[in-house]
Amino acid sequence: MTASGWSGYGGTKVKGPGSTRHLGHFADKIEGEKGSLTRENRLSKRRRAREMAIQMLYQSDLGRESCDKVLADFKPGDYLSEEAEGATAVATTRRASTTEVSARREAQLGGALEYARKLVRGTLDHQEQIDKLIRQQAEHWRLERMPAVDRNILRLAVYEFLFETDVPKLVILDEAIELAKEFGTEQSGRFVNGVLDGILKTPDLPGPLT
């Protein structure tokens, strides 16, 4: 962001604080220490859950589908298949069987999938309240015209700000930025950072900051 507290996004400005709070330190630390670790090793349960939740929210948004239908139709096997190659590499390196690795991954995903469903249902149940906060902050960018990925990353993060109060808000912010970088455009990380950083300054936002 510039010193005036505005950040450009696709030719449009987003209201935000006077300095950028880009909290990539968690991801940077992992990146620096991962060595030969695969993506499977690095993802926490909550990170997996957020990735799956974004997929479901995206489907609900673009398909105009109900929460129940989205939750019922989501196929976790599609998510697992993205990590199959990494899991096989781990099995070879550690001399573990692919069956053992698969069982471990499915067990990990089970908890993450349950949490993802909770995030999706909560986000959709409170979408009107969430969208109001986003509109107030991104006052020069219509919510409906935002890229769908960015819009739903914002919705998920704001839901967590409001209702997942056991998770520090700076952790939620950092995770949202990383998701935007992974699934959005080159500008998505900066845009999501600007909107959420401004929302963090909302008076009486529940839960701890750090």
Image (cartoon, grey):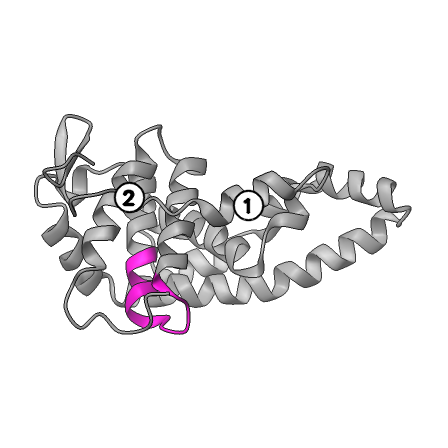
Q: Residue at x 18, y 37 (%)?
A: 145
Q: Is residue 112 left or right of residue 59?
A: right
Sequence order check, earlier mark of 1 and 2: 1
Q: Secondary structure at mark 2?
A: helix
> Would you name the residue on which mark 2 appears?
192
Q: Quadrant of residue 128?
A: bottom left
Work out which quarter of the rendered image holds the C terminus and state it. bottom left
Could you tell me what secondary structure mostly forms the magenta stretch? helix
Q: Is residue 176 magenta?
A: no
Q: Quadrant of residue 199?
A: bottom left
Image location (x, y in percent) of residue 100: 84, 55
Image location (x, y in percent) of residue 86: 72, 39
> Would you name the residue on which mark 1 appears?
29
Q: Is residue 199 left or right of residue 170?
A: left
The reply to whether the C-beta atoms of the residues labelled 1 and 2 are less than 8 Å apart is no
Image location (x, y in percent) of residue 132: 14, 58
Q: Secondary structure at mark 1?
A: helix
Q: Is the residue 172 above or below the residue 148 in the image?
A: below
Q: Residues within 10 Å of mark 1 (few under 14, many from 20)?
A: few
Image location (x, y in percent) of residue 75: 56, 51
Please state which amino acid type lies under the numbered disc 2. Val
Please state which amino acid type lies under the numbered disc 1. Lys
Q: Is residue 8 left or right of residue 152?
A: left
Q: Is the residue 118 above or below the residue 158 in the image?
A: below
Magenta-colored span: 157-169
Residue at the extreme right of the image, as rendered: 95
Q: Residue at x 26, y 73 (%)?
A: 206
